[in-house]
Amino acid sequence: QVQLVQSGAEVKKPGASVTVSCKASGYTFTNYYTHWVRQAPGQGLEWMGIINPSGGGPSYAQNFWGRVTLTSHMSTVYMELSTLRSEDTAVYYCVRGSKLSDLRMDVWGQGTTVTVSS
Amino acid sequence: QSALTQPASVSGSPGQSITISCTGTSSDVGSYNLVSWYQQHPGKVPKLMIYEGSERPSGVSNRFSGSKSGNTASLTISGLQAEDEADYYCCSYAGSSTYVFGTGTKVNVL
């Protein structure tokens, strides 16, 4: 079945970097985009960026310019967030995105909790 | 890019209909018919309920419907049920391969 499986929870100190992975299965990886979305505790969803595994540069939300990097290799997408601060404590999701005109985001990973604490 | 504006909460009794608004700008909601809606129960992963403004994925109840007028998109839940109690988020394409989510709405079933 179609699924996105993310790496496990992380605890990091302020100023450090974190990398979260997202492995896709059950579909042709390069036929879809992969988005990253995060959700701080008790807060709403926040779109972070998108990558096209078949080529072309990633696109990032302005709030994350200079701190987030998306890469892909084989059937896995990686999200690196640098210069972590306490406000980056959140659940991070990868999400499959359609390349068709509807641009829907239809399959979500299980989420990865990143805790930033000294 | 500012978050789309949604009401913090909407309430309704079982069987009633409710509507959640999602207000953006002429740069996002107003420019594209690419608003999607997600349902999230506590502690769960968001689920796609509506895409491309008014389309329902396979398996989503036809009690859920979407529409748009100008810079505001709407999600209507008809025949409200206890299981519909959840948080709902809209999301719009905003051009240049960027997207923006709404602030989220908690639906309470009285």
Image: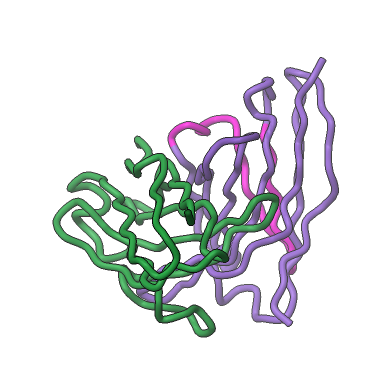
Chain colours: A purple, B green
Q: Is A101 drawn above or below residue B20 in the view shown?
A: below
Residue A113 in sight from this viewpoint: yes
Residue at x-position 14% and y-position 55%? B70
Q: Is residue B18 left or right of residue A87?
A: left
Residue at x-position 70% and y-position 50%? B43
Residue B7: give x, y in percent of width and height: 35, 42
Residue B69: give x, y in percent of width and height: 16, 60
- On whether residue A64 falls in the magenta region, the answer is yes
Residue at x-position 51% and y-position 53%? A57
Q: Is residue A60 left or right of residue A71?
A: left
For the residue pair A59 and B33, the one nearer the viewer reads as B33
- On whether residue A109 falls in the magenta region, the answer is no
Q: Quadrant of residue B4?
A: top left
Residue A105: give x, y in percent of width and height: 51, 65
For the residue pair B91 and A5, the one nearer the viewer reads as B91
Q: Is residue B25 left or right of residue A22?
A: left
Q: Is A75 drawn above or below residue A35 in the view shown?
A: below
Residue at x-position 48% and y-position 51%? B108
Residue B95 in sight from this viewpoint: no
Residue B27: give x, y in percent of width and height: 22, 47
Image: magenta residue range:
A62-81
Q: Is residue A65 left or right of residue B17?
A: right
Quadrant in the picture for the N terminus of chain A: bottom right
Q: Is A32 drawn above or below residue A43 in the view shown?
A: below
Q: Main secondary structure of the magenta part?
A: strand
Quadrant in the picture for the C terminus of chain A: top right
- Residue at the top extreme? A118
